[in-house]
Image (cartoon, rainbow, N blue to C red):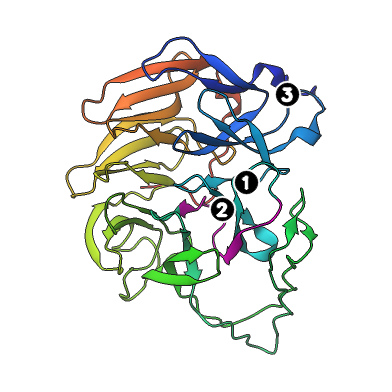
Amino acid sequence: MGGRADLSKEGLFEVPATGGNVKRMVQGRAIIQDSAGKLIVYTFQGAGSGGYQDWGIYGISFGGSGKARWYPANLPWVRLSPKGDLFAIPYDKAKAIVFFPAKANTQQNAGYVPAENRTTPAAWIASGDGIWLVHNEAPAQPAGGMMMGPGGMMGGGMMGPEMGMMGGMGMMGGMGMMGGMAQNYSIAIGKKDQSITPIVKKVGKESHAVSIPGSTDIAACLSSGQGAGAQAQPWPGPKQGIYIYDGKGNEKRKLTGERAIAMEASPDGKYVAFVWGDKLPLSLSVAPVDGRMVRRVAHNLVGIVGGCKPFAWSADSKSLAYGAEDETANGVFVVNVETGRTIRLSSAPSTKAAAPARPAGGGGR
């Protein structure tokens, strides 16, 4: 076994959008997960060979003030609500996504919603009171004599550092083998009261969606199926790629045939940026919501690491920041989505010898 990594040289840094002096806000392995307004949520894995007691989910304000540990465990991903009042995390044992208040030492969960796909980080709906998820509408009807085991109830209990049960949050019972169950997946809105509202029907399990700011429209990446109630067929089918749907699930237009690994709409609602590719390095493209030509703005992204978003929009919707590697080293870059002009904001040691693994379910054509 080799020696432990020197995490003291890592950290969470702040750098002006135009470049300049870098300020370290957190020392140690901090992985930014999401942001809302002036608030950042990140996972922390310590600053040295020990310090496991400091691991967890943290919140901090831009500039470095207000640092607090919200939850004492690291999860595959964390997503912060648009209002910055809740965060969502996956809970595989109960096949659910759980919501917690975004505050120091939170233990009481604010609710949960069952979710088929917990590998792809959830995207919040525009109102901030629910998330986009993939829901299986098929009734649970066991076949061949095998029955489903008893399922526990999930109440408003506390969740410990290892996502164990510490009160009213029960465990899902064992599930027996089931044969002949139909799969009928939909892109749906899930809320903390466990309500699920299907929007785009007959999609693949790996599909995902994001809200378009300033409207009730959504951008949906279909991994398989036909969408919107049409006859389903295996991927790749005619509905492969990213589509715009209205809030009732009616298709409006196709943006691209590429299958997005991650995507996010611009704050002004005019673009959908998405990461795609069959292998590293990945590409970053921008699709105008009105259906105009898609433009690839970067082609050297190093991948999605530790649940973090691979890119972020500027507040004015004119630029994208992303992590990539050029002929020099890894770093953070900013590209103007209209002109294509790119600048480097920061540098880090090269990772060519140990490129991050491609996320599950990713890839495009």
The residue that label 1 is drawn on is 76
Answer whether residue 116 is magenta in the image: yes
Among numbered discs 3 and 1, the one appearing first in the sequence: 3
Left or right of 136? Residue 365 is: left
- How many other residues sit within 10 Å of disc 2, few (<14), some (14-19) or many (≥20)? some
Q: Are marks 3 and 2 in contact (CB under 8 Å)?
A: no
Q: Position of residue 313 (x, y in %)?
A: 36, 35
Q: Position of residue 44 (x, y in %)?
A: 67, 33
Left or right of 254? Residue 153 is: right
Nearer to us in this view, 181 or 50? 50
- How many other residues sit within 10 Å of disc 1, few (<14), some (14-19) or many (≥20)? some
What's under tag 3, amino acid-wise? Ala
Q: Are marks 2 and 1 in contact (CB under 8 Å)?
A: yes
Among numbered discs 2 and 1, the one appearing first in the sequence: 1
Residue 349 visible from this viewpoint: no
The residue that label 2 is drawn on is 119
**299 versus 95 height, above or below:** above
Quadrant placement of the N terminus: top right
Among numbered discs 3 and 2, the one appearing first in the sequence: 3
Magenta stretch in the rendered image:
107-123
